[in-house]
Structure formats: structure tokens, C-alpha cells
Amino acid sequence: MDLKNNLNETLNNMILSASGWRGIFSDDEESKSEKISKAHNVICAGAAFVFAEYLNCCCDPCAPIVLLGSDTRPTGKAIADAMIPVLMACGCEVRYVGITAAPEIMAWARSLNTAKTGFIYISASHNPIGHNGIKFGLTDGGVLHAEEAAKLVTAFHKLMERDDSIEKLEKLSLAVDTPRLEKIFSGEKNNKALAKKAYYDFCGDVVWGANLSVNTLDILSASKEGLTKKPLGIVCDFNGSARTVSIDKDFFASLGVKFECINDKPGQIVHRIVPEGESLIPCCKLLEEAHERDSSFVLGYVPDCDGDRGNLVIWDDTVAKARALEAQEVFALACVAEFSQLVWTKEFIPGKAVKAAVAVNDPTSMRVDRIAKAFGISVFRAEVGEANVVTLARKLREEGYIVRILGEGSAGGNITHPSAVRDPINTILAVAKMLSVNSVNERKGLFETWCNYSNQVEKYREDFTLADIIASLPPFVTTPAYSKDAILQIKTHDHGELKDKYQKVFLREWEERKEQLKQRFGFCSWDAIAYNGTAERRGLPRFGEAGRGGLKVLFFDGEGTETAYIWMRGSHTEPVFRIMADVAGTDAGVERFLLDWQRKMIMIADE
């Protein structure tokens, strides 16, 4: 097969979306080979070219600055090698940082805040080790908005369709001499130091709040005082991720938090990358060992390869062992902490004129709605995709809302303003603040604040533990997004067509089952909702209007309270179709029934 045909075949197997351009860059998805094919070299060169052209569209005469880094996947360096010469040939000033966590390179880009500056981050996030990908962003601290990302994809396809695309890119790749390239790579150590400093400084603003007019620095003082009285120990299974060479150890040490870790060498990936299910078992064992030696160790985390998410394990006093939290629990816990902090700092006073909101993705559990309602905070939903949620939060701020926290509950972790990317440091310290910030003068501690606002005063006690906080969360049973039961393989390529067929099946099923659903689960009515980008459309007359976006069927009880949902959407970063169910209460059998029912209806529609 000639290179052009191979290139087309390789492109057909890649997914290009606002969340990143991803594919299998190695021999297979579990391969640890460092080499990439000639076709992938061309693709990387083309990605560099269109991003350089994108930055050069500005009228500013200065050369574009491109920050470039990667996670710890074996193919990361080869991809960087393919991109750097093209960026340089296009007139860009390239600053290569080597291995860096996603929040780190984004904080570095934010700190520059100059015209025509952007970053390229090489990563496939939670995908298997043989996968890799490319993310693009500017200086606002996150990846490109969906509309801007679409411009890059369009420009890239036009470039690849040209008959002379390979020749053009090869010529650019050879246009830069060796001494200039060596200078780029020799700056890696200095750039890494600059990136880490920018990230360290920015984390302080994020965790404690940058709005000094409402005395948010008081929360730092209260946290440190609380940690002195009641020490906290944290463990981490880095799993060879980019966080192995980031700020974690130093940042926690600055607060007096004890820290122990395993698999802390870059590239020491010893288990599945996605931090869910079995991937959390080693961290649970580590936490149990640490807790046995020192009872202050009660919390642990496992990041994914690029280090922008980290799901949690906790020491649970009620069962006297460590256990993993579900991703939805983690996000809910972070929401409780950050909402309580807004009240503690008086940045938001429920019932007053100032509005507050939380932006989430469409399959985020409704437990967040219950938490937000307790504080008088509004919930807004966007389609799956971090870029969608970040864009929605920005729109809400423009409308006058305070949006302290946002994120994708289905994936765990959280984004805390002014950050525009998930970060396990923010998640861990949200929990740490709940544990350490107690009553100061007339202000109640964060956990007591939550208990009061949620009408659970009886659950507060002075010697509360992390297990007490978890037990206070609204009870919901939700399908884990990365469980085998949440994934389908479908034949229908047109997802709008599939959803139209699904509508016919659902309407028939509803008529046949509605009395059973009412008697057994209390479902009295339903609504169909589409999520596309940042738009939510309720009362959907035709399910197919959701297209490739999310489709949710929401169930209400006799009083009109939202009590459960079933949801579907094809992934834009993986070749899978995801389904999910979410139901109020603790009966896992209801979630199982809804999920099985959803699967059955989709498979009938897919015939």
C-alpha cells in the first residue's frame, strides 16, 4: 500500500473532536512501542501546520509561541519530533517542555497571556497505552472551544485532501537545520521549571479563591489551622503518569499534608490507565497500609495518564477498610465542598441577588441537582466533552452567575474556577477543606454548613470523619461510565436515525409498561431531552433531533419530581456507544432494570 492510501486508512481510524484528535499510534492499542508509522508522521506534521496557520491568522506581527508537551505514553516523543520542525518552518517559536501534566501546560500557557500564543498537548487521556492524540489550546487555560476546534478539523481535512499534501509537509519537515532543532530540545529543562512554577502559583488561586475582596484567603488560614489540629495523610498511585514529574508532592507538603506514593517513575504504567474499577485497587491497598501505620492517612487518588483527572479512594470507618468512590460520588463531594466554601467566604449568600450556578455534562447524576438545590444554586447541563462544559460555564459567567465549580460527573474529578481543566489537586483539596475548615468566629465549618443547608443538622458532630461526609450525600445509584455494562457496539452509523427508531420502540414500551413503572418505581411521566454542544432542549418532539449528541429520557414521580433517567450517546473519542441510568435511592436493582431496559430498546432500534 502506498503512503497516500495508508494515510487515508489511518485517518479513517482516527477520531477528531473538540476533546482531542485520537487514534492508535502504536502497533496496537496495548503496544509499548515508541515508534509511529510514516502515515502518523504526516498526520502529526499536518496537525502542526494547521495550528500554526490558525495562530498566524491574527494581525499581530509577532511570531506565534507554541508550548509543546506530552504525557508519558511511549509514542509521545515521536509525535513531538514530527511536529516541531513544521511549527518552526511555519515561523513559530516553539517551547518544548517534555513530559508535563495537562493542567500544568495549560497553567503555563495562561501565565503568558500574550497574543498568538497557544499550546499543543500530546495525549490520549484515559485511553489504552498504544493510543495517543493531540489537544490544542490558547491562553485561557483550556482546550479550544468546540467552534474553534471545528475550524482546525476543517482546515486539516482540506490539507489532507490535497494531492501534494505529503510532499508539502515533508518539505516543511526538512526545512529546519539541526542546530535550531537542538536548541529547542536543550531548553526543555528550563521550560519545565517555568511550567511547574506557573502551575504551582496558579493552584493556590484555584484552591483558595482569587477574589481577595471577599476574604477568600481566610479559607487558606482556616485550612492550615485545621490541618495542624487534625493532620491529614494522602496516598497516590501515580501509575507512571505525567503527574510523576509535576507539583503534587511539593504542593501538598507546603500545606503540611503527609504524602506517600507508588509507581512514581514517568512511564511506569503498571495497570489500566482509566482510573476506575480495578485500577483503584492498588491505591486502596496502599491506603490501608499507610492507615495501619498512621491513622491520619484517610485519602488517596489515582490520576489518568495526562493527569487531569484523579478518582478517589477513602478510608471508610464504617467498614474499617479502604474503598474506591464512584466517579459521580467524587464530583458530588467536590460540589458540596465548593458550594460550602462560597457560603463560608460570603461570596455567595443564598437568597440574595447574586446568582450562582454549576455547569455539568448531561450524564452527571441528579444527586448534584439535589445538592445545588439545598444552596439555591442553579444547575445547567451541556453535552459530554470538557470543552462543552467549560464553554457553558463561561457563558453563564457572562450572564452574571458565579460558577465556582463545573465538570463531568460521569468522568469524576472537577474543574474549579478560574481553572478550565480538571485537576486532581483541586479535587483532593476540596475534600481536605471539608475535613479541616471548622467553625471560625461566627462562621460554621464547611461540613456543618452543608448539614445545615441540606436539613441534616443531626448528621454533624465535632469529630466527624470522611465517611460521615460521604454518608450525607443524596443517595443515588448511577451506572459507572466506564463499566462494561455501559458500553454498546452498534451497527447504525447515523445516530439521529438510530434515535428516531429508538423513539418508536420507547413509545411502544412506555404504553405497555407504564402501569408497571408507576406501581414499581413511581414513574408517572417522562420528558425527552437533547444535548448538543452547550444547548439543552427539553420536550423533544423527535428524538432524532439529538443527532450525535446526548439523548436523555427523564422520569418524574406523581409530584413532578425528577427521580431517574436513562441516557445514550456515541463517544466522540472512542469507537463505542455509551448508555447509563441514574435513579434516586439506594436500590441498585432499579438502576439495573433501567439499564437493561435501555440496552434492549437500543438493540431493537439498531436491528
Image (tube, rainbow, N blue to C red):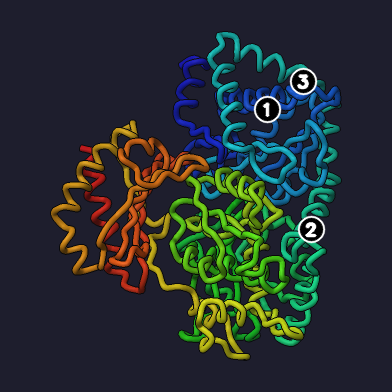
- Residue 460 occupies quadrant: bottom right
Callout in the foreground (2, 3): 2
User: Above or below — where is 381 with respect to 479?
Assistant: above
Residue under the point 77% across and 76% down = 256
Q: Which amino acid does the dot numbered 3 rest on?
A: Ala
Locate residue 548, reporting x and y percent. 40, 37
Horizontally, residue 307 falls left or right of residue 4, namely right
Nearer-the-camera pick, 49 or 236: 49
Locate residue 152, reporting x and y percent. 61, 27
Is residue 283 visible in the rendered image? The answer is: no
Residue at the top extreme, as displayed = 163
The number of numbered discs placed on residues in the rendered structure image is 3
Q: Secondary structure at mark 1?
A: helix
Nearer-the-camera pick, 419 or 212: 212
User: Above or below — where is 146 with respect to 50?
Assistant: below
Report if the CB atoms under discs 3 and 1 are less than 8 Å apart. no
Q: CA distance from mark 2 to mark 1?
A: 28 Å
Report if the CB atoms under discs 2 and 1 are less than 8 Å apart. no
- Mark earlier in primary sequence (2, 1): 1
- Quadrant where the N terminus lies? top left
Nearer-the-camera pick, 342 or 57: 342
**Label placed on residue 89:** 3
Q: Secondary structure at mark 3?
A: helix
Q: Which residue is mark 1?
A: 51
Residue under the point 49% across and 34% down = 15
Q: Which amino acid does the dot numbered 1 rest on?
A: Phe
Q: Which amino acid does the dot numbered 2 rest on?
A: Tyr
